[in-house]
Image: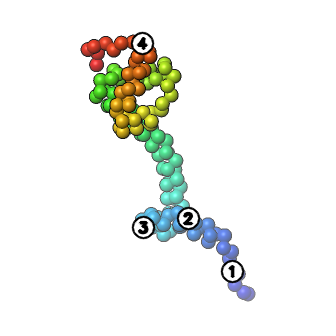
Amino acid sequence: MTRIRRGYIARRRRTKMRLFASSFRGAHSKLTRTITQQKIRALFSAHRDRGSQKRNFRRLWITRINAVIREGGVSHSYSRLIHDLYKVRLLLNRKILAQIAILNRDCLYTISNEIIKEVGYKKSVGII
């Protein structure tokens, strides 16, 4: 009886998995079963960490804005600034505010002072 040659579909699937895992170390890039396990694990971690990355960047932006505002003595705090932004209906997101705070502090001070004038309350002296 003649030998039957197998198709190429399974080999093509394994080759795609190997290409995905080519940068992994040791058996994680050589053995098909461990490649499959590591691929599942890597994709799970990537999905989970996308959410945590968004949270971490938001925390970083808030920290930067707060540091610049407290340093300049423009507004009492970050939360007061954000509250006043919403009152005035000036929609600047935290990413843009953080970039303004890092690259051009005077612009952030100007924005904050204009908001304080428009909202109509005066900063109390001595409140930190």
**How far, Cα to Cα, is label 3 from label 1?**
31 Å
Check disc 1 and report the residue beneath it: 5
Whether tag 3 and tag 1 are in contact, CB under 8 A, the answer is no
Q: Residue at x 61, y 66 (%)?
A: 13
**How far, Cα to Cα, is label 2 from label 3?**
15 Å
Q: Is residue 39 placed above or below 110 in the rendered structure?
A: below
Q: Residue 17, labelled with which disc?
A: 2
Q: Residue 120, labelled with which disc?
A: 4
**Identity, as a three-letter code, of the amino acid under mark 3:** Gly
> Looking at this view, is 61 or 97 the one in front?
97
**How far, Cα to Cα, is label 4 from label 3?**
66 Å
**How far, Cα to Cα, is label 2 from label 4?**
62 Å
Q: Is residue 89 placed above or below 17 in the rendered structure?
A: above
Check disc 3 and report the residue beneath it: 26
> Looking at this view, is 79 or 6 the one in front?
79
Whether tag 4 and tag 3 are in contact, CB under 8 A, the answer is no
Q: Could you tell me residue 111's position as x and y percent? A: 41, 26
Total marks in image: 4
Q: Is residue 80 left or right of residue 127?
A: right
Q: Secondary structure at mark 1?
A: loop
Q: Secondary structure at mark 3?
A: helix
